[in-house]
Amino acid sequence: MKKYIHNEKGLTLVEILASFVILSILIIAFLTLFGQSAKQNRLSEEVMDATYIAQRNMEEIYAESQSYTFESYLVNHPETKRSGLEDSYTFSKEENDYTVVVKLKEPDDGKRNGSLLVEVYDSPSRNKLKAQMETILLWR
């Protein structure tokens, strides 16, 4: 019985403090990873939303290109203005906290194909491009 009472095996204060320090370092590292993961998820969600908006706008114009000629499209959409380039037209609109900029290139003479570029910026500053899609349209 005396043997168990006078047993001096155990943890010293230095050993306990060292284990707390190691445990704290591990916890801080994991908390940093969780914060970065949440930030990356938010950014990915913004890009996905902007890409969806760009795709939807592109599909709407594609559907109209199957029904209209380029000239009749311009007549039906007076918001579309000629841009600085001779054969280029553009318009922009606000949609779900984003600014959508649509750029149409007029088909070449005697051809029906023109290009379409849809850009989605964060609104209203327009300083950060969130998504962009481009295609060639074959007008009716």
Image: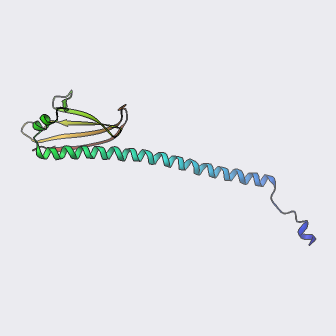
The x, y position of residue 19, in whole percent, is 72, 54
The x, y position of residue 64, in whole percent, is 15, 44
Instruction: Name the outermost residue toward the right.
Output: 2
Q: Quadrant of residue 57?
A: top left
* 8 vs 55: above or below: below
Q: Is residue 34 left or right of residue 21?
A: left
Along the line of sight, the residue nearer the viewer: 113 or 99? 99
Along the line of sight, the residue nearer the viewer: 18 or 57? 57
**Location of the C terminus (image quadrant):** top left
Q: Is residue 28 left or right of residue 3?
A: left
The x, y position of residue 83, in whole percent, is 20, 28
**Location of the N terminus (image quadrant):** bottom right
At a point 54% along the width and 50% down the height, the residue shown is: 34
Count of all numbered marks drawn on residues in the image: 0
The x, y position of residue 126, in whole percent, is 35, 32
* 127 vs 43: above or below: above
Q: Is residue 17 left or right of residue 29?
A: right
Q: Is residue 35 left or right of residue 112?
A: right
Instruction: Name the outermost residue toward the bottom.
Output: 1
